[in-house]
Image: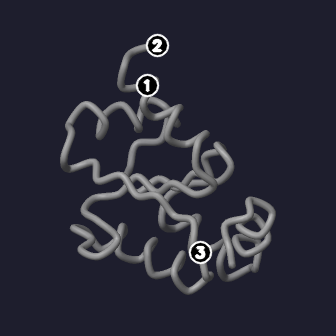
Amino acid sequence: MSEVQDFIKETVTSHPVVLFMKGTAQFPQCGFSGRAIQILKASGVTKLVTVNVLEDEEVRQGVKEYANWPTIPQLYVSGEFLGGSDIIAEMHESGELLTVLKEAGALE
């Protein structure tokens, strides 16, 4: 495993909720990343770590390989890949996202 893959694995397994995104939670750099952040905030997530993939091209490509998922953002909860912004939105609408976040201990 490469250093980038090690970094990604360490990040997603060390924190309850990790979002690999374009930009930051305060300043998303794409609409999909912004949408994902809005949904997570609306869900009440307090233990969220974000990784700005625009700061490191190796991480940007590496996370796509790690999850075998071609797009950013990517949400991980309890070390498991959940999906991108469309899947996050669907899970939010069905109530499934809140359940997963509660189980991960990511809410107040």
Q: Amino acid at mark 3?
A: Val
Image disc number at residue 1: 2
Identify the residue at horizontal 80%, vertical 63% (top origin): 103
Query: 19 or 49, which lies in front?
Result: 49
Residue found at the far bottom of this picture = 42
Q: Secondary structure at mark 3?
A: loop
User: In which quadrant of the rendered image does the C terminus lie?
Assistant: bottom right
Q: Earlier in the sequence, mark 2 or mark 3?
A: 2
Helix, strand or loop under label 1: helix
Q: Residues within 10 Å of mark 3 (few under 14, many from 20)?
A: some
Which numbered circle lies on residue 5? 1
Element type where label 2 sits in the image: loop
Residue with the mark numbered 3: 45
Instruction: Give the class, few, some or many, for how many residues have Cα within 10 Å of label 2's Cα (few <14, many ≥20).
Output: few
Q: Name the kind of residue labelled 1 in the image.
A: Gln
Q: Are marks 3 and 1 in contact (CB under 8 Å)?
A: no
The answer to whether 50 is drawn above or below residue 70 in the figure is below
Q: Which mark is residue 41?
A: none
Locate residue 41, reporting x and y percent: 51, 81
Give the Cα distance between marks 3 and 1: 25 Å
Q: Where does the image place residue 57, in percent across and percent down from the top left?
A: 20, 36
Q: Are marks 1 and 2 in contact (CB under 8 Å)?
A: yes
Amino acid, disc 2 = Met
> Alpha carbon of mark 1 to alpha carbon of mark 2: how far?
6 Å
Q: Earlier in the sequence, mark 3 or mark 1?
A: 1
Q: Nearer the viewer, mark 2 or mark 3?
A: 3
**Residue furthest top in the image:** 1
Residue density around tag 1, few if under 14, some if 14–19, many if 20 or more, within 10 Å: some
Q: What residue appears at the point 77 percent right and 70 percent down from the top-left corner?
A: 102
Residue 61 position within the rendered picture, expressed as x and y whole percent measured from the top left: 30, 34
Q: Position of residue 46 (x, y in %)?
A: 57, 73
